[in-house]
Image (cartoon, rainbow, N blue to C red):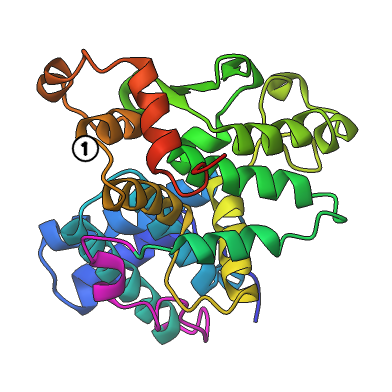
Amino acid sequence: MPSESLNKNLIKHFADYLRLELSLSDNSVEAYCHDVNLFLQYLEAEKASTDIHTITQDTIESFFAYLFDLNIGATSQSRILSGLKSFWRYLIQEGITEKDPTLLISSPAMGRHLPEVLSFEEIQKMIDSIDLSQPTGHRNKAMIEVMYGCGLRVSELINLHISDVYKEDGFLRILGKGSKERLVPIGESSLKILYQYIEGARLHITPKPKYTDTVFLNSRGTGLTRQMVFLIVKELAEKNDINKVISPHTFRHSFATHLLEGGANLLAVQQMLGHASVSTTEIYTHISDELLRDTLTTYHPRFKNK
């Protein structure tokens, strides 16, 4: 079957189909096309293939992991999925493709309010299974350690700079949503593994000029995409027979869940996650960096008894 790219022209044909064949209202047509355009923007931002025939279920799941990372709510995710399903029904009906990558993706799985939580044992199993003899081994191990050990969003992980790592103090400077900075403690174990990568495997990669300070690099010397991190996490879960629908965000949610289950201070956890509104931030700005470090060391299973 000849190649067909997802582009503005194809979306326009989809709009004509919705309007003329299905007699949908202008508002409904606009909503469906908005959903498909959002997916196209994601592919372009991630520099992923827009060839209809190369878009798989993994691509769609990665897109929804990205939406989750942006805190797009369950209702909006469900609507966007509906739009993508309609689009692929159109493609199949028009003979543009024979496969529907949205077929096995259900709204309840994508639209649940809380993601899966990995146990500490499952996370440790995933970390231990990483093959350090492979060129990407130390990088992937450091990525998982930092995501889980510091509760970072995937966007914060891939944009982390070496200059943001305060090795002596044991903190990461994170630029979160709305360009808000926060300091997040990093335990000795995670910091050690992070520097084994920075001062080891990373030295064998020549960064492109724009990425000289970026921590996590691909083999071409540029930064990782959200989709790449999603696929790495997915492959590790499958390798270890972990039958949960997980994404990079799962490590962040597991980080918070494990801390709170262990009795950690809720406000300290919120500050580490960077989840506070302005009014909430004013309530607990008195929480010191030392308390954040003590909270991580005392309650995070990775750093207990270190």
As shown in the figure, which amino acid type bears the numbered disc 1?
Leu
> Magenta residues, as a range?
94-115
Looking at the rendered structure, the secondary structure element under dot 1 is helix
Q: Is residue 135 left or right of residue 41?
A: right
Where residue 150 sits: x, y (%)?
Answer: 47, 37
Where residue 129 sits: x, y (%)?
Answer: 70, 65
Marker count (numbered):
1
From the viewer's side, name the closer residue of 48 and 20.
48
Q: Is residue 82 visible?
A: yes
Residue 3, quarter of the rendered image: bottom right
Residue drawn 61% across the image and 65% down it: 125
Location of residue 56 with respect to 231 vertically, above or below: below
Q: Is residue 152 visible?
A: no
- Label 1: few (<14), some or many (≥20) within 10 Å? few
From the viewer's side, name the closer residue of 97 and 162.
162
Residue drawn 31% across the image and 52% down it: 257
From the viewer's side, name the closer residue of 276 and 51.
276
Where residue 197 sits: x, y (%)?
Answer: 76, 36
Q: Is residue 176 left or right of residue 19?
A: right
Question: Residue 103 magenta-drawn?
Answer: yes
Q: Main secondary structure of the magenta part?
A: loop
Q: Which residue is mark 1?
A: 266
Q: Is residue 240 left or right of residue 78?
A: right
| Quarter the N terminus occupies | bottom right
Question: Residue 24 magenta-drawn?
Answer: no
Where residue 256 sits: x, y (%)?
Answer: 33, 46
Location of residue 236 with respect to 265 vertically, above or below: below
Q: Is residue 83 left or right of residue 157?
A: left
Location of residue 46 with respect to 11 vertically, above or below: above
Location of residue 151 with respect to 1 vertically, above or below: above
| Quarter the C terminus occupies | top right
